[in-house]
C-alpha cells in the first residue's frame, strides 16, 4: 500500500485513537502540549502520528516512510529523510538528517535506532543538546539508555551557545543521569578556545542545584605575606543531612595548608566545624599553624537545648598571616563557651561557661576579658497578670582572671509595670528593685552590696494625617515621646568592674534606664528624655518611605556615678573611668532614613555637641541602586577624637559583559586608605571570571595586600568561597553576575519542532 500524498496524520494505531475520540470533552492539543505532557501511564500504548511524502507497508506489521518524515508521540518528535517502523517490536530505524526532540533533549545524527517501548536507542556521529541544562556536544557514539540516562564515547561537552566555543570538555566517556542529577566524565581534557589547559582522569558534576560530590571552582591568588596561592575545594555530599568540603591550599611562601568544613543537621541538632592546618610554615621557622572552630546547637528535649561555640588558633598572628578577610583579621577575643538553656515559656534559664583566647597586637596590647566560670541566668516575664506586667532578671557569675581582681556576683532585679494603651496613646509606668551582692572575701573585701529602687515612666502619643509628597499620597505620623527615670545615688566606687562599660549614646540607648552595660554600675538618675519622630507611610503597601527623629535627654539633677573603682587590682582606675555628665542636658541626637525613590536610599545620623555647637558623631550613607547588579554606596563616618572616614563602594556594569566592583575607605585623620578592594567580573554566559585586589590594615601600621582570580565554568561546579566572600563583605547590595541574566538564555540553533 503506497500513499503518494503527504499525510498530515496517518494513524498507526487507529483503534486507540477512535476510543479517545469518543470520550466527552476531548479537544485538540497543540504540539507543545505533546512535547511537555506527563509520562504515559505504564502498560498503555502510546499514540503515534506519522507523516511523510510517501508511506508503504501494513499498519499491523511494518511501515516505511520516505521524504520529510516526521514521527510524533507524547513527549517526542522524530524527523528524518527515511524511516522504517517495526510495529510489533516498536523499533524505529531512521536515516538521513535525523533529529530526535525528546522533551527538550535534541539529538542530530545520520542514523538512529530507537526503541519506542523502552525509550532507548543508539546513534553514531551525533550532536546533542540538553535544553534544560543549556549543554551541548558531539559524540562518536551515543546511547539513550532510558528517558533520563545517556552514555557517550568520544564526546565533547559545553554550556556555551552555538557557534561560540569559549570552552569545552573533550571526553573519552560521558554519563548523564538525570535520575541521580549528576554527570560523570572519564578522560576529560578542558580546552579553552581549542587550547588544552587541564586534564582530569575523572570528573563528576551536578545537573541541578542539588548537592553533589565533586570539585568546586578553584581559585588563585597572591598576597604579600604568603605569596602565590592556589585552592581547590573538594565537596563531599556524604548524606542528605551532612556534608564536608576539603580544600587543599597551596601557599608558595609557607607550604601546603589543609582547610576543612563539615556541616551536619538532624531534627534535633545542627552545627558546623571548621579546621585549618599548616604543618610546616616556612615563614615562621617551621612552626605548625592551625585554626579550629565549632558551632553546635542541640535540642535535648522540647524545652532544653545545648549550645557550644569553641574557637582556637595557634598564635596571635594566625589571622593576620593566613586570612584574607578584614572581619576575620579584626578579631581579638575568640570565644569558647558552652551551656544549657531551658525555655519554660514565660521564663527561661541558662547555665554556661565562657572563656576567651585573646590575640594581642604587639603595638596596641589590650586587657583580656574576664572568664565566666560559670554563669547562671534566670529571666521571667509575665504579661497581663491582673492588668500588670511582671518581670524578674537574676544572675550568678563567678569571674576569673589571671591578673585582675576576681570574685562572684549575684544580681536580682524584680520589676512591675502597668501598661495603659489606647489607639493613639501608650503610657507605661514601671517600678523595680535592683539588688547586687559580691563575694570578694578572697580579695580581703567584705560587705560589697548595692540595693537601688528604679522608677521609669514611658509615654508615647501618635498623631496621623494624610498628606502629599512629590505628588504622591502618604500617611504622615507625628510621634512625641517622653521617658522619665528616677534612680537614687549610691556610692559604687568600692565595687569591682568585671564586665561593665559605658553604653554608646544613640537613639537606641537614650530611652534605657542605665547608661552602663553590665551589672557592676547603675547610674543615679533624675532625668527625662524627649523625642519627636515623624514617618511617611505609603497607604497602599504600608511601607515606611521616610522617618525623621530628634531626641535629647534632660538632667533634673547632676549624675555622680562613674566607672571609677578604688579596689586594688581593678581593671578601671579613676584616671580611666567615665566622666559623669556635668550639663543639664545631653547632646542632641538627629536621624533621617528612608527610601527616597525606587533607586535612592538614605540613612543619616548625627550627635550634636551642645556645649561646642558642633557634631560629635556623624554617619551619612546614601545608596543608588536602579537595578540588580548596579549599586553605588557612599558614606561618611566621624567620631571626634577617634576616627573620620569616607567610604565608597559599588558594583556597576561597564559593558554588557564587564562589571566593575570595589570599595575604598579612606581615613582623614591618618591620611591613608584603610580598606581598598578593586575587582573586575566578566560574564560570558557559559563561563565567568573574577579578578579582585584587596588591601587592608591588620596590626597597627601593618597592611596586607592580596590578589585573587577565579574562573567558573557554568554547569560544572558551584562557586568557591573566595573572592566572592570578599565582595559580599565589602559591597552592600552586591549580586553575583551570573544570576543577573538568569532566564534570558536564548538559543535558536535548536528550535522546538
Image (cartoon, rainbow, N blue to C red):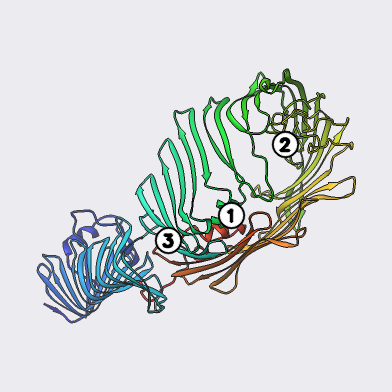
**Label 1 neighbour load within 10 Å: few <14, some 14-19, many 20+:** many
Outermost residue toward the front?
285
The residue tagged 1 is: 320
The residue tagged 2 is: 501
Separation of residues labelled 3 and 2 (CA atoms): 45 Å
The residue tagged 3 is: 232
Residue 245 vs residue 344, the one in the foreground: 245
Number of marks in the rendered image: 3
Whole-percent x and y of residue 711? 46, 68
Whether residue 572 is visible here, answered yes or no, is yes
Which is in the foreground here, disc 3 or disc 1? 1
- Counting residues from the N terminus, which is met first, the one under dot 3 or under dot 2? 3
In the displayed structure, would residue 422 be above or below residue 651? above
Disc 2, SS: strand
For the N terminus, give its image quadrant. Answer: bottom left
Residue 669 vs residue 441, the one in the foreground: 441
Whole-percent x and y of residue 614? 87, 51
Separation of residues labelled 3 and 1 (CA atoms): 22 Å
- Counting residues from the N terminus, which is met first, the one under dot 1 or under dot 2? 1
Disc 1, SS: helix
Amino acid at each position: 500500500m503506497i500513499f503518494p500524498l503527504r499525510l498530515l496524520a496517518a494513524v498507526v494505531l487507529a483503534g486507540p485513537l477512535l476510543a479517545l475520540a469518543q470520550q466527552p470533552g476531548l479537544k485538540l492539543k497543540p504540539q507543545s502540549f505533546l512535547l511537555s505532557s506527563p509520562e504515559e501511564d505504564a502498560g498503555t500504548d502510546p499514540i503515534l502520528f506519522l507523516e511523510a511524502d510517501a508511506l508503504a507497508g501494513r499498519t499491523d506489521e511494518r511501515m516505511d516512510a520516505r521524504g520529510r518524515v516526521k514521527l510524533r508521540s507524547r513527549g517526542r518528535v522524530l524527523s528524518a529523510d527515511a524511516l522504517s517502523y517495526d510495529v510489533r517490536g516498536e523499533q524505529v530505524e531512521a536515516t538521513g538528517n535525523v533529529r530526535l526532540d525528546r522533551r527538550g533533549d535534541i539529538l542530530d545524527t545520520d542514523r538512529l535506532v530507537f526503541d519506542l517501548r523502552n525509550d532507548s536507542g543508539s546513534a553514531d556521529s551525533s550532536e546533542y543538546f540538553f535544553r534544560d541544562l543549556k549543554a551541548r556536544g558531539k559524540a562518536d557514539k551515543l546511547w539513550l539508555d532510558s528517558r533520563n540516562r545517556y552514555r557517550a564515547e568520544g564526546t565533547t561537552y559545553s554550556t556555551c551557545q552555538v557557534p561560540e566555543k569559549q570552552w569545552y570538555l573533550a571526553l573519552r566517556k560521558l554519563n548523564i543521569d538525570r535520575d541521580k542529577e549528576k554527570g560523570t566524565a572519564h578522560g576529560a581534557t578542558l580546552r579553552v578556545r581549542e587550547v588544552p589547559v587541564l586534564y582530569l582522569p575523572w570528573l563528576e558534576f551536578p545537573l541541578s542545584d542539588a548537592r553533589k560530590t565533586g570539585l568546586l571552582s578553584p581559585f588563585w591568588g597572591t598576597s604579600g605575606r604568603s605569596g602565590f596561592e592556589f585552592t581547590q575545594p573538594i565537596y563531599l555530599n556524604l548524606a542528605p543531612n551532612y556534608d564536608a568540603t576539603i580544600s587543599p591550599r597551596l601557599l608558595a611562601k609557607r607550604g601546603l595548608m589543609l582547610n576543612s568544613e563539615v556541616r551536619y543537621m538532624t531534627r534535633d541538632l545542627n552545627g558546623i566545624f571548621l579546621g585549618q592546618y599548616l604543618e610546616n610554615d616556612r615563614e615562621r621557622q617551621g612552626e605548625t599553624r592551625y585554626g579550629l572552630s565549632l558551632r553546635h546547637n542541640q535540642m535535648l528535649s522540647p524545652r532544653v537545648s545545648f549550645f557550644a561555640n569553641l574557637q582556637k588558633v595557634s598564635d596571635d598572628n594566625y589571622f593576620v598571616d593566613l586570612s584574607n578577610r578584614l572581619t576575620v583579621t579584626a578579631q581579638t577575643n575568640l570565644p569558647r563557651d558552652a551551656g544549657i538553656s531551658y525555655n519554660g515559656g514565660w521564663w527561661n534559664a541558662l547555665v554556661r561557661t565562657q572563656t576567651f583566647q585573646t590575640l594581642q597586637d604587639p603595638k596596641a596590647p589590650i586587657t583580656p576579658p574576664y572568664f565566666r566560670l560559670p554563669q547562671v541566668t534566670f529571666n521571667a516575664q509575665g504579661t497581663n497578670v491582673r492588668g500588670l506586667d511582671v518581670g524578674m532578671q537574676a544572675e550568678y557569675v563567678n569571674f576569673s582572671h589571671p591578673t585582675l581582681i576576681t570574685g562572684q556576683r549575684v544580681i536580682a532585679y524584680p520589676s512591675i509595670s502597668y501598661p495603659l494603651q489606647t489607639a493613639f496613646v501608650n503610657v507605661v509606668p514601671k517600678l523595680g528593685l535592683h539588688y547586687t551582692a559580691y563575694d570578694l572575701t578572697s580579695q580581703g573585701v567584705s560587705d560589697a552590696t548595692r540595693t537601688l529602687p528604679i522608677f521609669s515612666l514611658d509615654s508615647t502619643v501618635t498623631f496621623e494625617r494624610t498628606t502629599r509628597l512629590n505628588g504622591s499620597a502618604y500617611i504622615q505620623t507625628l510621634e512625641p515621646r517622653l521617658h522619665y527615670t528616677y534612680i537614687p545615688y549610691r556610692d559604687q566606687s568600692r565595687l569591682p568592674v568585671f564586665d561593665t562599660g559605658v553604653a554608646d549614646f544613640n537613639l537606641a540607648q537614650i530611652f534605657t534606664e542605665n547608661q552602663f552595660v553590665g551589672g557592676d554600675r547603675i547610674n543615679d538618675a533624675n532625668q527625662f528624655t524627649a523625642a519627636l519622630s515623624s514617618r511617611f507611610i505609603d497607604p497602599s503597601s504600608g511601607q515606611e518611605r521616610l522617618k525623621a527623629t530628634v531626641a535629647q535627654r534632660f538632667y533634673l539633677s547632676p549624675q555622680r556615678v562613674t566607672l571609677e573603682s578604688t579596689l586594688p587590682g581593678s581593671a578601671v582606675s579613676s584616671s580611666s573611668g567615665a566622666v559623669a555628665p556635668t550639663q543639664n542636658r545631653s547632646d542632641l541626637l538627629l536621624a533621617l532614613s528612608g527610601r527616597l525613590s525606587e533607586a535612592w536610599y538614605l540613612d543619616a545620623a548625627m550627635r550634636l555637641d551642645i556645649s561646642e555647637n558642633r557634631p560629635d558623631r556623624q554617619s551619612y550613607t546614601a545608596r543608588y541602586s536602579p537595578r540588580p547588579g548596579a549599586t553605588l554606596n557612599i558614606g561618611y563616618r566621624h567620631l571626634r577624637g577617634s576616627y573620620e572616614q569616607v567610604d565608597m563602594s559599588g558594583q556597576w556594569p561597564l559593558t554588557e559583559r564587564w562589571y566593575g566592583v570595589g570599595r575604598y575607605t579612606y581615613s582623614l585623620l591618618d591620611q591613608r586608605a584603610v580598606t581598598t578592594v578593586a575587582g573586575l567580573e566578566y560574564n560570558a554566559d557559559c563561563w565567568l571570571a573574577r579578578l579582585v585586589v584587596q588591601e587592608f590594615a591588620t596590626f597597627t601600621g601593618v597592611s596586607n595586600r592580596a590578589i585573587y582570580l577565579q574562573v567558573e565554568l557554568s554547569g560544572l561546579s558551584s562557586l568557591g568561597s573566595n573572592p566572592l566572600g570578599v565582595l559580599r563583605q565589602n559591597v552592600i547590595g552586591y549580586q553575583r553576575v551570573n544570576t543577573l541574566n538568569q532566564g534570558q538564555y536564548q538559543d535558536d540553533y535548536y528550535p522546538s519542532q
